[in-house]
């Protein structure tokens, strides 16, 4: 055991650091709460621990111990389930719901971050053990482990980064107008608002945006209902929505212009500021489940058929 | 899970007796536009419904 003590500790620390680094760039508002933080931190340590003991197990020719990693996979699936359930449970308490697609995306992100901790620990272990195999001095071994671990952290972090709306579309302020009782933004009818009082509030305090997709793939991403729900949720939680449960008039709805795929949304916030609204919408993540490459697939399969 | 009837017209508020006839949905006849506005607001607040304007003096309150 003594032989592997430093290897395991180095791997454990590197894996935990990997998880901690991802904690910083977590979803705004969630889960920077102390309880969730501690929970995920501990799970990160466990994940790193599982990765750390894999290399010593192989070195000792205890190949059965690799089934440990299967246990880890099971454990991370539970992390995903736990996140999904807890977000599902609080969904009814949100004025503007997150939507199932967004919840699924957040849950998947948590699972993936645990894999990052495990792989980092595993990589660090491999680096250290290679040094040990080549009979390098102990400091060089640690350095090798840390370097390999860091490469994995940076690489995976880059991979997990994902896109936000500003990468795929232009967002600009738009004008709210009423066509009789119909709330209209940039020529797209959003909904029918009967009460004169509500119409007045929309005219006075309402802000609106128009999202213009840059390419066809972006168009189909923005058509996804889950993606639009995520935009509505982010805008209303981050800007503070002016709505209560008995005021469905002020529910923000992102509607699509069927002619050109643009998405428009009107929202009444506590302090109307259209620049902030544009910024928030730009920073909304593109959900993994809404990613489409429709044209790509259609084009390639057509070419395949033609034998090109 | 939240159960309930949605996408359903809860009530009709109108100043125009000639246009609306209903056997299921309650119809409220208002004296003038101001009264219509007030009635619609009260019903919407009570039922958490949303007021939609069908023009020609008719409001429907819909549960979404």
Image: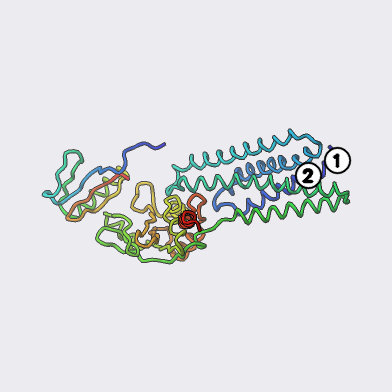
> What label sits on residue A222 in the rendered view?
none
Left/right placement of residue A129 relative to residue A294 reads right
Quick one: quadrant of the C terminus of chain B?
top left
> What label sits on residue A3 in the rendered view?
1
Mark 1 and mark 2 on one chain: yes
| Front residue of A130 and A278 | A130
- Residue A296, percent across and down? 49, 57
In this figure, which residue is indicated by the disc labeled 2?
A9
- Residue B24, percent across and down? 19, 38
The answer for how far apart the CA atoms under marks 1 and 2 are is 12 Å
- Residue A76, percent across and down? 62, 40
Q: Is residue A206 visible?
A: yes
Left/right placement of residue A140 relative to residue A304 reads right
Query: What residue do we see at 38% from left, 54% from top?
Result: A253
- Residue A109, percent across and down? 57, 48
Left/right placement of residue A215 relative to residue A162 reads left
Query: What residue do we see at 31% from left, 59% from top?
Result: A189
Of helix, strand and loop, which one carries label 1?
helix
């Amino acid at each position: 055991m003594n032989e592997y003590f430093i290897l395991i500790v180095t791997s454990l620390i590197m894996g935990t650091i990997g998880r901690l680094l991802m904690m910083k760039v977590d979803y705004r508002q969630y889960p920077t709460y102390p309880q969730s933080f501690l929970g995920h931190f501990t799970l990160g340590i466990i994940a790193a621990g599982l990765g750390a003991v894999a290399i010593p197990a192989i070195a000792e020719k205890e190949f059965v111990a690799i089934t440990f990693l299967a246990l880890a996979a099971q454990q991370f699936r539970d992390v995903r389930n736990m996140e999904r359930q807890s977000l599902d449970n609080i969904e009814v308490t949100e004025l503007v719901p997150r939507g199932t697609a967004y919840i699924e995306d957040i849950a998947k992100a948590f699972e993936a971050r645990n894999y990052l901790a495990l792989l980092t620990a595993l990589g660090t272990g491999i680096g250290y053990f290679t040094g040990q195999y080549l009979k390098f001095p102990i400091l060089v071994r640690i350095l090798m482990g840390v370097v390999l671990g860091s490469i994995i952290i940076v690489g995976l972090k880059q991979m997990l980064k994902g896109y936000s709306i500003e990468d795929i579309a232009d967002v600009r302020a738009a004008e709210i107008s009423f066509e009789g009782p119909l709330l209209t933004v940039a020529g797209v009818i959003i909904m029918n608002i009967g009460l004169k009082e509500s119409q007045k509030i929309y005219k006075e305090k309402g802000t609106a945006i128009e999202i213009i997709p840059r390419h066809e793939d972006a168009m189909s991403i923005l058509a996804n209902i889950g993606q639009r729900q995520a935009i509505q949720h982010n805008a209303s939680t981050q800007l503070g929505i002016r709505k209560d449960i008995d005021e469905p008039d002020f529910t923000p709805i992102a509607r699509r212009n069927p002619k050109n795929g643009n998405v428009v949304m009107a929202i009444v916030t506590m302090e109307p500021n259209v620049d902030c609204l544009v910024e928030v919408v730009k920073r909304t993540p593109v959900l993994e489940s809404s990613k489409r490459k429709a044209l790509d697939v259609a084009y390639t399969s057509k070419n395949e058929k033609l034998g090109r | 899970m939240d159960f309930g009837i949605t996408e359903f017209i809860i009530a009709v508020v109108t100043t125009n007796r000639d246009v609306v006839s209903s056997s299921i949905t309650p119809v409220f006849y208002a004296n003038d536009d101001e009264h219509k506005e007030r009635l619609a607001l009260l019903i919407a607040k009570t039922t958490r419904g949303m007021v939609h304007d069908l023009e020609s003096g008719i409001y429907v309150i819909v549960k979404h």
